[in-house]
Amino acid sequence: MKEQVKNNQPMNFFINRAMGIGNSGVEHAQFYRARRFDEVGLPYRYIFVQLINNLHEAMDTWNLKNDQVINMYEYFVLGDDYLHQGVQKFYPVKNETVVDGTNTTRLLKVQTASGMKIIETMVKFPNKEHNLLIMSLSKVEIYSSKTGEKKVTFDFYDNGHKETLIKNIHLYNQNGHQLYFPNEVQLQRYFFEQVDKAYGHSNNWFLDRGEESEAALLYPKMPQSKVVEVVHADHLSDRNDPRYPLWNNYYEYSLTHLDNIDKIISATKMQTNDLIEDFPNKKDKFATIPVGGVADKGSSKTRPRARNKKLRSLKLITASRLAGEKHIDMLVMAVAKVHKQGKTVSLDIYGAGGEKDLIEKTIKKEKAESYIKLKGLSKHLEDVYPKYDAFISASFSEGFGLTTVEALSAGLPVIAFKARFGALEMIQDGVNGFLQDFKRGDDNVDFDVKSLANGINRLLKSNYSQVQKATISSMASFQNHVIANKWKEFVDALRANQ
């Protein structure tokens, strides 16, 4: 049964590879956009195209409703009704590992909450670079828990560029048909066509992540569809030669196929202007809408506790994925450097990720266990920020910087590198925060650590109450209702001239 959308509005699909318990800024930007769409009555669905074993546990963690999310593989298993109704029967999650006589994992068996039975076959592959055998995923089979019927199979292969892709994809009993696709792009194209048909064809597709999804949607572009690319990071790798900009590989496809895309949204005016520099004849293609915002003025969350005019001690917070590009180890070294200068300073680190061990080792190396602590993942940072004096970041590139907005809104001055684009747009050096120079490369770690330490000391010497007062006023244009109205105007305008 086709869903009746209020006033015949098009459905808005937010396309991403995956989500999990711990997420990147892309997923949090999607969550934020969904709340603003709710605010102004715009319909939407999340679409995730990866096989996600713990999808519904992650959805519960982030309060996503069952019928708000469409997963490509769940559709292949559960059928057409799933596209509108979500999962209708939930199953106990089961995990089983099958090992051989050498205690080597050969099979991974999973039953998901949605009723997919997944069997993953592991094989040994030669790693020529390190001259050894490694275990790697070779084949996946997916069955219906309800019927026991095989629904999907595909193989993995190494494309020679340190990427693992899928091929030889078979779909079974898709409305009575068995289908074959040689690669993921063609598989996604079929999937998007089924979703488009189920929702009446006149739909808007917001591409948040995935080059395969870009290719699947654009060639050929589905009639009556509108395709919007949402830029979540710096679109450039470098501009050393102004005539030949080197694109960030995540956005190279969209920027080299701009005629097929209806709009490109970036989170800051500065990035939009930078894009127009390269495409001066296509300026109407570009728009600016922040991917995050703050509670409307008057909310209790916008009234931080009063602070003393001068700081005798400093409680710092940072919050992000614990990933290499966030350079949390540099933050640890910078805070330790200031502490060794005799200043009373502490740092709490919120987040989860693969760099946790490195960060812990850095804390121990600096003998900073008493004043630098890992606090884990928090879903309620808005309640955490008021406990601190300032926010600090060591990222070299932030398309927006959601935590920067949140921190400023909570009355926390921000110390950050002069990174494109978010920090440069939101932080006025010496007014509501402190911007520091940085240099890329392992040879420049000492420079970057000293620069961050200098930023901390600048804050300690500042008129803190004056800086803090400026943080709130600088966030007026990032209030939730302002951004919600921008989205409403943007979506309405997409269809205005059709």
Image (tube, helix red, strand yellow):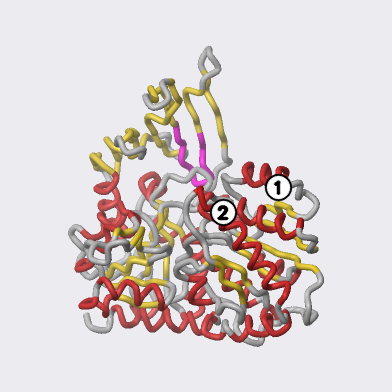
Question: Residue 113 lies in magenta, yes or no?
Answer: yes
Q: Position of residue 45 (x, y in %)?
A: 42, 64
Magenta portion: prevailing SS class: strand
Residue at 41% across / 21% down in the picture? 131
Establish if 453 lies above or below 150. Answer: below
Residue at 45% over, 84% down: 485
Badge 1 or badge 2: first in the primary sequence:
2
Q: Which mark is residue 363?
A: 1
Q: Residues within 10 Å of mark 2 (few under 14, many from 20)?
A: some
Residue 347 percent coordinates (x, y): 72, 59
Q: Position of 85 compared to 353: left or right?
A: left
The residues colored magenta run 110-119
Task: Say which of 272 and 125 sits in front.
Answer: 272
Q: Mark 2: which amino acid?
A: His
Question: Where's residue 39, x and y in %?
Answer: 51, 79
**Whole-Å distance between the Cαs marked 1 and 2?**
13 Å
